[in-house]
Image (tube, coloured by chain):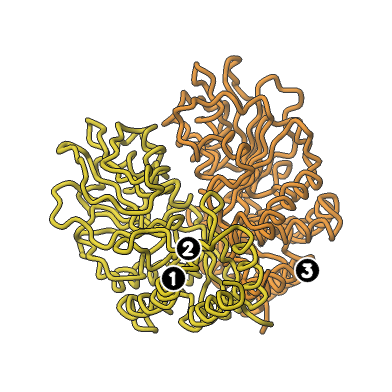
Chain colours: A yellow, B orange
Amino acid sequence: MTRSYNFSAGPGALPLEVLEEASKGLIEFTKGAGIQEISHRSPAFLEIRDSILSNLRQLMDIPKNYKILLCQGGATLQFTMVPMNLLKPNKKCDYLETGIWAEKAGEHARKIGDVNIIASSKGEKYTYIPKIWNIRPDTSYIHLTSNNTVYGTQIHEFPKNSNIPIVCDMSSDILSRSVDVSQFGLIYAGAQKNLGPSGVVVVIIREDLLDLVDDKTPDLLQYKKYIEYDSLYNTPPTFSFYVLDLVLKWVKNKGGVNYFENLNAEKAHLIYKEIDRSGFYKGSVVGEDRSLMNIVFHLPNKELTDRFVKEAEENNLVNLAGYRSVGGIRVSTYNAVTLEACKALSQFMRDFENKVG
Amino acid sequence: MTRSYNFSAGPGALPLEVLEEASKGLIEFTKGAGIQEISHRSPAFLEIRDSILSNLRQLMDIPKNYKILLCQGGATLQFTMVPMNLLKPNKKCDYLETGIWAEKAGEHARKIGDVNIIASSKGEKYTYIPKIWNIRPDTSYIHLTSNNTVYGTQIHEFPKNSNIPIVCDMSSDILSRSVDVSQFGLIYAGAQKNLGPSGVVVVIIREDLLDLVDDKTPDLLQYKKYIEYDSLYNTPPTFSFYVLDLVLKWVKNKGGVNYFENLNAEKAHLIYKEIDRSGFYKGSVVGEDRSLMNIVFHLPNKELTDRFVKEAEENNLVNLAGYRSVGGIRVSTYNAVTLEACKALSQFMRDFENKVG
């Protein structure tokens, strides 16, 4: 059995150690039953839930006045839950538009509140992060998307000491670098990129924001119900919880967020170096806003792009095609993508260029 | 490695063949990547989605004017989505109260509409299914819970030719017996009992009911959006889809719903026979409404009940303790619980009674 070097944008690669452990747990986890076959209220499962919450708190150094909860419905349901839970009576909320997902977050919020776009790089095909924002002083919150998976930009500095709560979709870079949680009112992240499998979403919320919600809101859409029931209001996707727990333990064993921050910089550098060296590969975003998670570049034409993807696959380097509306190549280098994989890819980039360039 | 006879009420037992296949797919499913590590838009994953939909249609003989969709959030989110999507302007909806889950379905609906309880057996501790219903002629739908997991009752006959749409939560008995889908307006079922793993919910809806929803409703809470995007509006719990697909193929290979209907009757009979033979074990529901999925009975006292659970476990028979608020013993005999498991349990019941009775 040969595992590939997998650069999938999401659901993304997982550590082999985690998968091997999980494949055993599927058959027998406790009392001769697999992990999917036990009650979510059983002691063995409660241990998983508790371990997730305490490891997340430790890894991200989450302050005591923040709660952690585990939801379903992907980050997309958060596009609705955030305004449902955080809007003040004036219903104003401000969004920074830095890519397709940021755009969608705003669109979903428009069904709930009065959305203002504080800045957008849409006109320039999302090739940079706008730095000047037109924030309304009475907005309920400011929504950011920390990393743009499709175009390959990333916010490298977040507002400090904001009086207005900063809400951030960190789906594609959570745990990939250290962030100061106290700068945010709420952080959410679908797990399927840096945290584990799809099906579970992590939400980190400052306590004082829990009580703004209208009690007429359905229970499963109220953050405070998740706190009340310790993220087990109803049966969660138990296997997703389990794999998330294994991934967090793996992150911790490897050396935590700092370890991955350094490793991810090194990995991304290997690829950007090839782009910067070469006139053949063209990076599509401005240098200072480059993502360390999703590296997007273009070849001279579509024929060469297709050939690159095909020959890469023959060399065991898979899932490199760019997002459908963008084209080109996208290299996703989430935590579980190894340095070895990135070395192999950078070598392939040189070889391919030498052959056809 | 010894697998137990697992009578868990949910998440329930899964077929060993399915788990063995899934444990391979976790490591390598396609192109050297595991099933959790590929895009939900990749051809390999779309094949899984399509296979689920076509196998469900075939196994349940779902008519052409019904759509099938796959949601997240458990059956609990359906408690909210059903009224959000099906209420007519008068907002009236009628609920049959036959257990804790039926009760909760009504409670959640109360945040959205005007709920009327058409009958309830709550006063008699849910030991039977009320047969006389006070239906409002202008109600938008009638909500039923086909099987009561906690108390162990089951609706054995559904209304025929109802002008009012019948909505049914079949979470705990879908695919365990044949039903005529055309008798229903909408069927929903959390997967974690008879369909596979937790995290995914199957919804079967008659086409004419799709357009009642208010377009202000968030996209992910509108059934018609799931149709429009073929159940891939956003990243679903991909592993749950995968296991669901494997379970459906397993059901089909075994002989479909008819095979399980007969097998389940035989399995349940083995346990009910012990209850009926003995004064020692006391069934808690009226005979005609007995569930073939969850068999609930009591021993003379709590001490003996605890001893039963403990000694059963020593004999490899696990997860038999009753629901916290009910006590006693609960034997869940979902599709994946084998005849062999039920034979072993009925033998244990005789042995235990002979020893202590």
Q: Where does label 2 land, which residue?
A: A297
Residue B297: tell me if it is visible.
Answer: no
The picture places residue A207, in percent across and down from the top left corner, at 22, 53
When the figure is inspected, residue A287 is found, relative to residue A55, above or below; the finding is above
Q: Where does label 1 land, which residue?
A: A275
Which quadrant would the C terminus of chain B be assigned to in this image?
A: bottom right
Q: Is residue B209 left or right of residue A54?
A: right
Q: Looking at the image, which residue is at 68% across and 52% down? A: B49
Q: Where does label 3 land, which residue?
A: B343
Q: Secondary structure at mark 2?
A: strand
What's the amino acid at mark 1?
Ile
Closer to us: A288 or B164: A288
Q: Looking at the image, which residue is at 69% across and 19% down? A: B163
When the figure is inspected, residue A99 is found, relative to residue B308, above or below; the finding is above
Q: Is residue B240 left or right of residue A190?
A: right
Residue B52: tell me if it is visible.
Answer: yes
Chain for disc number 3:
B
Chain for disc number 1:
A
- Find out whether the residues at labels 1 and 2 contact each other: C-beta distance under 8 Å: yes
What's the amino acid at mark 2?
Phe
Q: Looking at the image, which residue is at 78% across and 61% down? A: B250
- Find out whether the residues at labels 3 and 2 contact each other: C-beta distance under 8 Å: no
The picture places residue A76, in percent across and down from the top left corner, at 45, 47
Closer to us: B48 or A283: A283
The picture places residue A176, in percent across and down from the top left corner, at 36, 70
Chain for disc number 2:
A
The picture places residue B98, in percent across and down from the top left corner, at 58, 38
Alpha-carbon span between mark 1 and mark 3: 66 Å
Q: Secondary structure at mark 3?
A: helix
Q: Is residue B173 left or right of residue A102?
A: right
